[in-house]
Amino acid sequence: MFTKIADMCTTAVGLLYIPGITELNPIASAIFHEMGTVTGVVVFGGVVVFAVAIVVELGACELYRWTGSPTWPVLLRGGAYGSVSFVYAAAAYQNAVLIANHVHLGLLL
């Protein structure tokens, strides 16, 4: 999940180097505060990816068991992982825009 890595990197950079940028997810924010930004981002990101993979793969196994068709689990995986990747890409993009706006303003001052 390269989009999750992009989200994690832009989150860490924004939180570490751009004053005023904060994490909006209260659970993630508490973890980052407790463990430190970089460690917290890596641990939280890893747990999220693992949890998503477990849910999707268990769902795909159950879908195959119910239908007996290998097609439906493939479609489920594509839809689920594609949707999650889109969300991570959107988060990384938003983070990058916030960082770029702050860096741009800092260079002008």
Image (cartoon, helix red, strand yellow):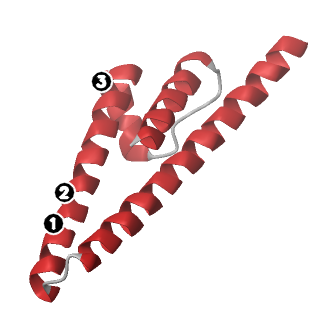
Mark 2–mark 1 distance (CA, rounded to whole Å): 6 Å
User: Quadrant of residue 18 in the image?
Assistant: top right
Residue highlighted by disc 3? 35
Q: Which residue does the image show at 41% across and 23% down from the upper left?
A: 37
Foreground of the two, 27 or 71: 71
Pointer 3 or 1: first along the chain:
3
Q: Can you tell which of label 2 and label 3 is closer to the viewer?
A: 2
Near-viewer residue (41 or 49): 49
Near mark 2 (Cα within 10 A), the count class, few <14, some 14-19 or many ≥20, is few
Judge whether 107 appears above or below 84 on screen.
Answer: above
Above or below residue 68? Residue 70 is above
Q: CA distance from mark 2 to mark 3?
A: 24 Å
Residue 72 drawn at (x, y percent): 27, 79
The x and y percentages for residue 12 are: 49, 25
Q: Within 10 angstroms of label 3, few (less than 14), some, or many (20 or more) residues?
A: some
Report the quarter where the N terminus lies. Answer: top left
Residue type (three-letter) at the residue carrying disc 2: Ile
Reading the image, the residue beneath label 1 is 58
In this rendering, would 2 be left or right of 51?
right
Asked whether, in this view, residue 101 is left or right of residue 55, the answer is right
Which x, y percent locates residue 8? Answer: 45, 33
Q: Which mark is residue 90?
A: none
Residue topped by disc 2 = 54
Pointers 2 and 1 in contact (C-beta within 8 Å): yes
